[in-house]
Amino acid sequence: MMEENIFSSPVQFIKNVGPRRAALLRRLGIETVGDLLYHFPRRYEDRSVTRSLVSSLLGETVTTYGVVIGGQEYRPRKNIQISKLALDGGRGVFYGVWFNQPYILSQMPPGTRLIVTGKLNRRFGAYEISVQDYEVIPRGLPLAPRRIVPVYTTTEKLYQKHLRTIIKNALEAWLPKINEFLPEELLRRHQIPSISEALYQIHNPDHPDKARAAYRRFVVEECFLFELALAILRERIRKKTKPHRYLRAGSLIPRVKASLPFHLTGAQKRVWHEIETDMQKDVPMRRLLQGDVGSGKTVIALLALCKAVESGLQGALMVPTEILAEQHYLKIKSFLKPFGVTTELLVGSMPESRKKEARSRILLGQSSIVIGTHALIQDKVMFHKLGLAVIDEQHRFGVRQRALLQEKGVQCDLLVMTATPIPRTLALTVYGDLDVSEIDEMPPGRREIETRVIPKEQLGKVFALLCAECSKGRQAYVVCPLIEESEQLNSEAAVELYRKISKQLAGQFRIGLLHGKMSAEDKEGVMEDFRAGHIDILVATTVVEVGLDVPNATVMIVFDAERFGLAQLHQLRGRVGRGSERSWCVLVADPKTEEARKRLKAIESTSDGFALAEVDLRIRGPGDFFGTKQSGLPDFRVADLQRDWRLFVQMRKEIPRYIKSLKPGTFKYFLLEQRLRHFQGKNLLYSLD
Ligand code: ADP
Ligand code: MG
């Protein structure tokens, strides 16, 4: 029966699940039988039965077997009730003790066969177990000599014991009806068990090896489904053609190139060629541009935007912070003014009247290039003819926001840029729906940034460096400690640090303050002063983290650096070393954990963002690195990008073969589709339609 699918049958129909337990299960994200069966154990406990209790096991949790020979109850204090059963373990008598479970005695009369688990003590010369878990073995059933018990993530009021029973019931009722949905060849190649075997073994392993094999099956399964979803998505995109076309040889690009104050590096030329080629195709571009901090991605975005403009289309550039939007806007606007290109800024904190005017110019096509923050993807914003959408610092946005910007046009071209590089192999799988370009070369004349980790006690050294550099006419950023909880607290910390530094240095230097709680206008003013060199030292929160480009700034000081992630520190460091002067990055830190020490050591010893990304992956795993929620990475149940990346890469290669063997309309195809939907629904990866 096709309707009887585990991924659509509600969990209520399982024995022992009523409305109350169904509600508890829902809290665990379990609504269907499939959800329940894919709720895998968090770990296992080895409860192999210990045949003889010996003193070397005292204090340990043991599992043993006994036949009830008698029992008693007592109440030593008002709120405590104790049930004590004497059990014959075959090699001597021991006691099982239960607290506040008054039914134990009546439920387990003499002769009952029991397996009990709990901590082993000795009292008055006899062994005694404080029972944490027990199981009655029905007459006639043998004792399994080795028992591996699953431990699940559960929720308040839903006990392990109950969850185990419910899952057991579900397996009993459904296993005979579950059919394999993965290609046979996949099972064979990876030597993994079938779905029913794997589901059974992952919940009730006969042996640890069986549990491992089952686990492996689900890793392969998730990996396969993920790559399959990406392949379907790529295929679908490939079939779309875009309504707009670009001029093959327009007049704006050559003029813009000629007036750049520098020559493009070889890497910039290469990626520009890749992008331009993509834009000229009939299908929409979907490209990721990776390049380390300071490698010069902005100018590439500028060229792409100009290509849209010279072809009579609009281009949009979305960035994560208002300060960065403002910076890009000012630069691009003044650069393109001589060419008669109109540039528009749209950020949330602009007065409503100004926003309204901007929106109307965007709608009428009077603005060719639109630069902004999340404000760009609001419903109210409509474009006249958007050809290209660029997203800078794309790791700060989610898949959904990326899609929303793209939907402002009709099949518009998409270029996403990131300075938070990820290893290429991983990029191919994670951003599997995008093509990847890489700027792997820095503009000429850059000098290595000197990075030092300095303990708080040596703050004097830090100030000396600040004074020395600012006296030479250079500028500095001072970033205050990061307080995760709120922007409010961060801003207060910045004000505090600003006061401290002003007290010490206000006579000598001009000091500015920048934080998230300031009005947009004040922020703009401060940034303008800093850019113009009217401020020597800028005390700021992490609002300065991404994108800012002030080449005269040569010092970056980060307080409490141990609180920052590696990617974040690398970004902050990237604010300096943008000119030809020697630059410093000072990390004032007092690392307390091994992990923090490793992070700081890594940033001190390498300036290569890609190498740092690899280190970060090793230290923290990709989940943290990408900020799973933001990157649109699925949250896998058992697969792990860091551990299993080879499998992902291999699977990506194998996928076309498997796709060929899938025959639409067959029962197997239907089953796979069901599971894929289930997988994607959970991950909110991409919608199927
Ligand atoms: P990012 O890749 O971090 O966004 P930017 O685009 O902000 O880097 O560029 C960093 C700095 O390098 C800017 O000041 C920019 O003008 C400069 N720059 C970019 N390309 C070149 C180049 N080919 N030669 C010299 N300087 C360049
Ligand atoms: Mg940038």
Image (cartoon, rainbow, N blue to C red):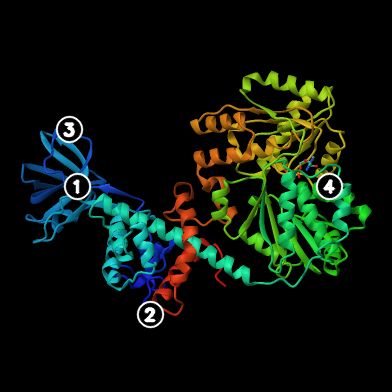
Disc 3 marks which amino acid?
A: Ser
Position of 264 with respect to 211 (left or right) is right
Q: Residue at x 80, y 62 (%)?
A: 308
Vertical placement of residue 361 versus 649, above or below: below
Mark positioned earlier in the residue sequence (3 or 1)? 1
Q: CA distance from mark 1 to mark 2?
A: 41 Å
Q: Quadrant of ligand 1?
A: top right
Q: CA distance from mark 3 to mark 4?
A: 73 Å
Q: Give neighbour class at mark 4: few <14, some 14-19, many 20+ (Cα, 10 Å).
A: few
Residue 467, x across and y down, in percent:
78, 21
Vertical placement of residue 309 versus 642, above or below: below
Q: Is residue 49 visible?
A: yes
**What residue would you read off at disc 1?**
48
Q: CA distance from mark 2 to mark 3?
A: 56 Å
Q: Is residue 682 visible?
A: no
User: Dot 2 lies on which element?
Assistant: loop
Residue 150, x across and y down, in percent:
29, 53
Q: CA distance from mark 4 to mark 2?
A: 62 Å
Q: Nearer the viewer, mark 4 or mark 2?
A: 2
Mark positioned earlier in the residue sequence (2 or 3)? 2
Q: Give neighbour class at mark 1: few <14, some 14-19, many 20+ (Cα, 10 Å).
A: some
Disc 1 marks which amino acid?
A: Ser
**What residue would you read off at disc 4?**
521
Q: Residue at x 41, y 54 (%)?
A: 638
Q: Does the closest atom of ligand 1 sit within 8 Å of the Cβ of label 3?
A: no
**What residue would you read off at disc 2?**
2
Q: Nearer the viewer, mark 3 or mark 4?
A: 3
